């Protein structure tokens, strides 16, 4: 029987496949949750230990780049609203910044355009399932991490592929700009990649056998497999690295505020509390518990290159 986690993903992915990913969303209907689990209401901004940059404060809202095709972290729900674990975090940050969880504009981004959106100031920060890599850290500044994952493979149930070694000389489906694609480019140069910008496109391509596997973060692949009995996840995790938010390079003021907000959430146990509301299956919750920062337990980035072969 499908897990509740898989059911959440299945419903969301069905919407993505049917309608495609929204280009942007100004979502004013969602409410953030505080660390105790109650809905945040309009009130005073929260002191997170660092001031909100004047440029952001003057706009009266945060503009955040998020995923819109990556359930349960960021996706478009049945009512055409942004939903998911990362979306709840964004609303909580707006509550900290302005005393209003809806003082927020959510802009859909992909692996290939999220950094350019940040650099061009279309968004204030990236919160889009972005693994830390030393290479990315040359162009943006990463916040402290708030989740963790690695790269694995999604293949048909009857596939002979059981590891990354089995990809030699074959075509693999991946997402442009994603960690999986970067790792394959650096570490498996004889693999041909068929690149897409959206998860729905990649999943369709896999079902059409346009590649022998779909390489992506294990957090997404495990749940795609949970909703599709014809698929399975294989391979040891590669490029294992936590996720962080991205701010413009050298923007020390914004980075300090974001890190302060994340530390405030960690101390309130917001991440674990909200994740359990997003993912209601207790067995799945326990599998992912180690991937979340909690009071007295933080995640850290690896030293050196995360794309080691």
Image (tube, rainbow, N blue to C red):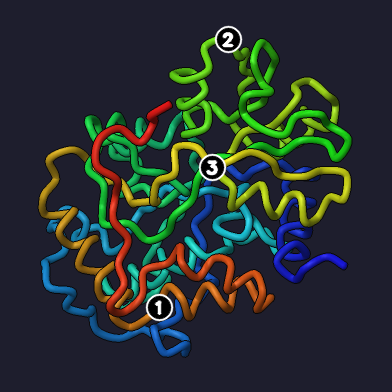
**How far separated are the C-alphas under marks 1 and 3?**
27 Å
Q: Write down the quadrant of residue 93 in the picture.
A: bottom left
What residue appears at the point 40 percent right and 46 percent down from the top-left corner? 241
Badges 1 and 3: C-beta atoms under 8 Å apart? no
**How far separated are the C-alphas under marks 1 and 2?**
43 Å
What residue appears at the point 77 percent right and 27 percent down from the top-left corner? 205
**Mark linked to residue 190:** 2
The answer to whether residue 137 is left or right of residue 201 is: left
Which residue is identified by label 1? 270
Q: Nearer the viewer, mark 1 or mark 2?
A: 2
Quarter of the image with the N terminus in it: bottom right
Find residue 140 and report its horizontal and vertical position in percent.
25, 37
Compared to residue 270, the image places residue 307 above or below, namely above
Q: Earlier in the sequence, mark 1 or mark 2?
A: 2
Find residue 14 and report its horizontal and vertical position in percent.
79, 51
Compared to residue 300, the image places residue 284 above or below, namely below
**Mark linked to residue 237:** 3
């Amino acid at each position: 029987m499908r897990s509740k986690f898989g059911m959440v993903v299945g419903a969301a992915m069905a919407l993505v496949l049917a309608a495609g990913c929204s280009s942007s969303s100004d979502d004013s209907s969602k409410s953030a949750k505080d660390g105790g689990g109650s809905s945040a209401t309009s009130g005073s901004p929260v002191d997170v230990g660092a001031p909100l940059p004047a440029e952001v404060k003057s706009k009266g809202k945060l503009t955040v780049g998020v995923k819109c095709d990556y359930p349960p972290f960021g996706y478009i729900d049945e009512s055409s609203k942004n939903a998911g674990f990362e979306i709840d975090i964004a609303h909580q940050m707006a509550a900290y910044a302005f005393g209003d969880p809806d003082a927020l504009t959510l802009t859909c981004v992909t692996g290939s355009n999220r950094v350019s959106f940040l650099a061009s100031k279309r968004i204030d920060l990236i919160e889009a399932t972005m693994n830390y890599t030393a290479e990315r850290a040359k162009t943006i500044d990463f916040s402290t991490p708030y989740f963790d994952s690695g790269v694995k493979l999604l293949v048909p149930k009857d596939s002979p592929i059981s590891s990354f070694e089995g990809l030699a000389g074959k075509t693999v489906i991946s997402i442009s700009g994603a960690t999986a694609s970067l790792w394959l480019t650096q570490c498996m140069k004889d693999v041909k990649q068929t690149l897409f910008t959206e998860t729905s496109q990649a999943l369709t391509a896999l079902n059409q056998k346009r590649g022998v596997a779909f390489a992506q973060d294990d957090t997404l692949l495990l749940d795609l497999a949970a909703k599709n009995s014809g698929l399975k996840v294989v391979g040891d995790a590669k490029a294992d690295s936590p996720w962080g938010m991205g701010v413009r390079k050298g923007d020390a003021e914004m980075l300090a505020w974001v890190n302060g907000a994340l530390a405030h959430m960690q101390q309130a146990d917001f991440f674990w509390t909200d994740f359990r509301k997003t993912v209601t299956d207790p067995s799945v919750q326990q599998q992912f518990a180690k991937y979340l920062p909690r009071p007295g337990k933080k995640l850290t980035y690896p030293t050196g290159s995360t794309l080691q072969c």
